[in-house]
Image: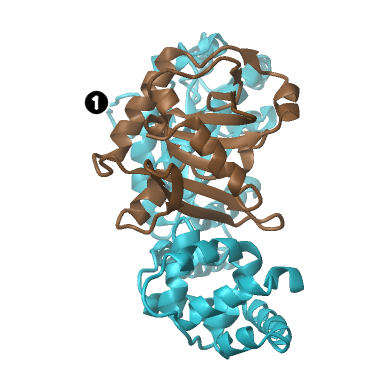
Chain colours: A cyan, B brown
Amino acid sequence: VALTELQISKLVERYIREQDRYGKMAGLVSRHASARLRDDAIPHMVTFRGKSPESLRGKLTRDRAKHSFDSFDGELTPTLLDLAGVRVLLYRPQDIEPTCIAIEEAFVVPAEDDVPDGKKRFRRDHDMPQGYRARHRIVTLHDELLGSDPEFANLKPVHCEVQVVTLLDHIWNELEHDIKYKTPDGQPSDEQGALLRSLRREIDTAQTTVVDLMDATDRQRGRNRTAIESAQALQQALQDRCGREVNGDLQRLLDLLRGVMREVTPASMSQLSLSGEDLDGAMARLRAVAATHPDLENAVRDDEVTAAIAALWPLHGRAFMKIVKTWRGPRSQVRRLIESLNDVSFQGMV
Amino acid sequence: MVQLRDIAKALDEDRDGYEYLDVFADDIYELREGKLSGGGRTVRRESHPALTIPVEDKILLIELYVEQGIARCRLVSAQDQATESSSVEGMIPGDVLQRLLQVAREKKEGLLGGLVLGMLIGRGSRSPVEIVLAMQFDPVSKRWQLYDGPLLRWAKQTIQPAAGVGSAAST
């Protein structure tokens, strides 16, 4: 027997009394899901909500023929499964499957091996090429989590719907949802249908670009974390940093940087004052000081390694002196430069 | 092994340029032999135990990063020690020390033999850039010298309390 208006109002009133519990469940599930995805290095965003009473009233009214009032005896769930809701928004489609696996491990998704009509309630995969795309998992909390805090005790019978969807598919889903549930007959007009199909194509293209962009960023991050172990690699990194061709005794500069830095990588070098502007400024100051100090003048070369040493001197000069004292063999230009800078107390003169 | 007075001396000599000396905890004689002298005070830190201890005419603050096996040492003034509101008389619990020493031995992976390495850590006053100078302790001359051996890269990665702790370690 379809729900009457009075029965719908009674159910909504009951929900209002229990609403806080569903909000608490959604918040808890979102926190734990997000923590798990962070551990798994899956880029994501999470939103959560307890269903609003108005939304519940609308849903019950639309689906009044699907429910009987008797089925709500006791708890609102499991008859209604989305009163607590979490949405996991992903950047890449390839993260959907691992995210679902993580959700199923982090929470309990009830088993439903024998579904008479094949319509599963707790695991739904919507993969329509031209339609709604998302995966839904209905979860409850593991006993271990329930027992970890007395505050969670009243969440034992509560279900939460976790939707896993890409950010771009979410845009399409939301726009289509507005048409489905906020227009009189719930059907798109010809114009809306054409625009939805067009949007789907554009979203699929944009999705590919998002994946390519994230892959490129990952590759760049990898390069930035790769240790610089040769003069050539340092030359490339320094050129990228200062935006110009770099010359000079790069092996000696690498020895100095290895001595003072935890690790010499493009990422760690980006923290140093080695921009083109830094190098120009340091070289100008060096030239000005060298003009009155012949030993320094003789050690200064018009190259970027010299400029880099001058630029790093205020922070690393003392350490550079310690390092060059350990160098064996003929006094290199870099060593002469550093000793001369030390002699003229370069830091104090700039 | 190195003694606390050797650490305090190195920090004092490089006081202008460097703030900390990080060493494997089991290389410090007083920690390894349980011979921390009297007058020490434990200091509460959010994530790790620490203590201040008088060493000759100086006071060392030693922060113990148990899961890294690292002791981070720096000189503090008597005033710093006095104003440490959460300090209490007494020493670090024995089980914490044992764990620290065990982790330090494991972290070395048997690579160092008797070599004692430390990292002098400095930071420019206007810069977030960390200066990390690898040092080697010479037990004969009792002096620290710059280390530029084959284990340099490994040492710089291993002898560190944890990423980003430098700025949080000030008293």
Q: Is residue B111 above or below residue A260?
A: above
Q: Chain of mark 1?
A: A
Q: Is residue A298 above or below residue B148?
A: below
- Please state which of residues A242 and A7 is positioned toward the viewer in this rendering: A242
- The residue at the point 67 percent across, 79 percent down is A282
Residue B71 seen in the current view: yes
Kind of residue sitting beneath label 1: Asp
- Please state which of residues B20 and A97 is positioned toward the viewer in this rendering: B20
Quadrant of the rendering where the N terminus of chain B is positioned? top left
State the image coordinates of residue B107 (x, y, percent, origin top left). 32, 37
* Position of residue A34 in the picture relative to residue A215 (left or right): right
State the image coordinates of residue A283 (x, y, percent, origin top left). 66, 83
Quarter of the figure with residue B129: bottom right
State the image coordinates of residue A165 (x, y, percent, origin top left). 46, 48
Counting every numbered tag in the picture gives 1
Q: Residues within 10 Å of mark 1 (few under 14, many from 20)?
A: few
- The residue at the point 60 percent across, 69 percent down is A312
* Position of residue B4 in the picture relative to residue A47 (left or right): left
Q: Secondary structure at mark 1?
A: loop
Q: What residue would you read off at disc 1?
A: A114
- Please state which of residues A101 and B119 is positioned toward the viewer in this rendering: B119
Residue A118 seen in the current view: no
Q: Residue furthest front?
A: B141
Q: Is residue B28 above or below residue A197?
A: above
- The residue at the point 54 percent across, 26 percent down is A28
